[in-house]
């Protein structure tokens, strides 16, 4: 006899691993399994849809429900097209900055200063690896003025208050020659959306009814 499918798999960006594990523990989401893909995919967003699709197809039949904890993440709609073909929902928004800040607050930040470079807790922790090394600035520092010539400020969207991370974020802003601003966001729409997913995954009828409310 085939094993019964597990209730829920969340296929997530590796940049969200710490936050999702914290939310899972805090809320007692014991039926939620989490599979994280490499955060380095953000440097090659055109590869995200195929990587997510491979994870979805590998999980088919093993889980009753699958949810994708990615925003569009620079795929230009390619992720949404793939998810529509697979019948899978994802997190709201264009990127993690939007769902951490919430859509309304992010729109306000963007309107106030379009030339804003954003950091999250994860990006502060891995700034050198993902930003400096990822953009090749460790090897070609002369490219920094060109890469950042349209930026004016750095906004650190804080998930968990930490003096060491704030200090590192300020240092990152200084290194890039940008003014610094800090916003306490917590987990924003990541928490509320995963809460909904965890709840409705326990009832397949409820899932079908509420799927349309999840933004693709």
Image: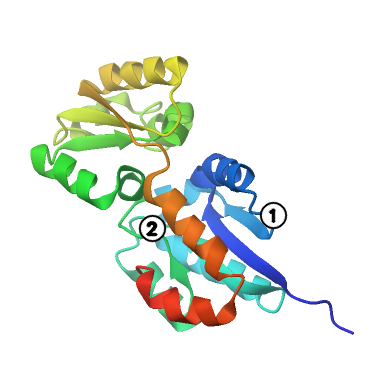
Question: Residue visible at 42% across and 37% down?
Answer: 134
Alpha-carbon neighbours of circle 1 within 10 Å: few (<14), some, or many (≥20)?
Answer: few
Query: How many numbered marks appear?
Result: 2
Query: Dot 2: what SS?
Result: loop
Where's residue 96, x and y in %?
37, 48
The label nearer to you, 2 versus 1, is: 1
| Residue found at x 50% / y 45% | 16
Q: Tell me, yes or no, if residue 51 can be seen here.
A: no
The picture quadrant where one finds residue 115 is top left
Q: Which mark is residue 71?
A: 2
Near-viewer residue (106 or 48): 106
- Measured as percent of width and height from the top left, residue 111 is found at 10, 44
In the picture, which quadrant includes the N terminus?
Answer: bottom right
Q: Which mark is residue 194?
A: none
Q: Most extreme residue toward the left, as rendered? A: 112
Q: In this view, does 151 lie to the left or right of 38?
A: left
Question: Which of the pair 160/72 is nearer the observer?
Answer: 160
> Residue placed at 23% from the left, 22% from the top?
180
Q: In which quarter of the image is residue 146?
A: top left
> In this rendering, is residue 103 above or below 130?
below
- For label 1, the residue is 30
């Amino acid at each position: 006899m085939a094993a019964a499918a597990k209730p829920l798999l969340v296929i997530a960006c590796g940049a969200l691993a710490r936050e999702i594990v914290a939310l899972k523990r805090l809320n007692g989401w014991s039926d939620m399994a989490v599979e994280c893909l490499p955060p380095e995919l953000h440097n090659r967003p055109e590869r995200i849809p195929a990587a997510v699709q491979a994870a979805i197809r590998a999980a088919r039949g093993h889980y009753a429900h699958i949810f994708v904890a990615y925003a569009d993440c620079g795929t230009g709609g390619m992720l949404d097209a793939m998810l529509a073909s697979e019948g899978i929902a994802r997190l709201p928004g264009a990127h993690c900055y939007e769902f951490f800040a919430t859509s309304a607050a992010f729109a306000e930040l963007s309107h106030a200063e379009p030339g804003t470079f954003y950091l999250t807790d994860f990006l502060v922790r891995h700034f050198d690896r993902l930003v400096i090394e990822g953009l090749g600035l460790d090897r070609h520092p002369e490219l920094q003025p060109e890469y950042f010539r349209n930026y004016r400020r750095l906004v650190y969207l804080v998930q968990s208050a930490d003096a060491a991370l704030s200090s590192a974020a300020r240092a990152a802003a200084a290194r890039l020659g940008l003014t610094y601003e800090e916003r306490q966001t917590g987990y924003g729409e990541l928490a509320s959306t995963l809460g909904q997913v965890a709840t409705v995954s326990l009832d397949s009828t409820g899932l079908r009814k509420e799927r349309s409310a999840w933004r693709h």
